[in-house]
Amino acid sequence: MGEYGSYFAMVTGHGSPTVRGACTCAKGTLVRPLISELFDQLVARHRESRRIDLDDIAEVIGTRAVSYDEVDHLVERLESEGFSVGEGIDESDVETMRRVLEEARQLRVALGRTPTVDEIAAAVGKPVYAVRRALERARGKVTGKRD
């Protein structure tokens, strides 16, 4: 039946009610192993900062099919573990943004072209996802798309 078929069966009550490796959340609904995997990835990425941007969740999900309820469960589980999810930026975010933009400008001059996110991340000693978030936030500040 496959992972989605079994998951559908558990949610709807039709067909086989088991999903190998699945667990049950606090609300008593079945959680696919994929959601636990996404949770583990986000915790590993943000263990130190304890803050997770919604864009980080979207990046970890990628193109995989995830329902709104599963995302809600993921956010609730992260928050129950003490992570701040989707909060505004703080001083450390501003400092990271400043460092990333400064390094990007220096690399542009040194390389004679726009540096890649990987190159900027290596130069500032931050993970690629953190540099990507800093660049997105900076772009939002310039264009007025974000608060």
Image: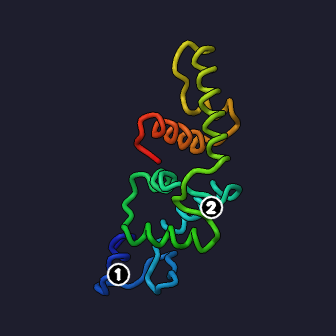
Give the x, y percent position of residue 84. 59, 63
Instruction: Give above or below for 15 relative to 94.
Output: below
Q: Is residue 122 above or below residue 59?
A: above
Which one is closest to the eye, mark 2 or mark 1?
A: 2
Q: Quadrant of the N terminus?
A: bottom left
Q: Position of residue 31 (x, y in %)?
A: 46, 76
Q: Taking 13 as reference, is 25 left or right? A: right
Of the residues under marks 2 and 1, which one precedes in the sequence?
A: 1
Q: Dot 2 surroundings within 10 Å: few (below 14), some, or many (20 or more)? A: some
Q: Position of residue 63 (x, y in %)?
A: 39, 52
Evaluate if marks 2 and 1 touch, with contact meaning CB atoms under 8 Å apart. no
Q: Which residue is mark 1?
A: 11
Label 1 sits on a secondary structure element that is helix
Q: Residue at x 56, y 40 (%)?
A: 134
Amino acid type of disc 1?
Answer: Val
Residue positioned 45% across, 56% down in the render: 61
Asked where in the image residue 130 lies, by quadrant, the reply is: top right
Identify the amino acid type marked 2. Val
Which residue position is annotated with label 2?
A: 43
| 36 vs 17, nearest the viewer | 36
Question: Residue 119: horizontal and vertical position, in percent?
Answer: 61, 28
Position of residue 46 relative to residue 75, above or below, is: above
Q: Residue at x 50, y 54 (%)?
A: 60
Q: How is the image coloured?
A: rainbow
Image quadrant where residue 3 sits: bottom left
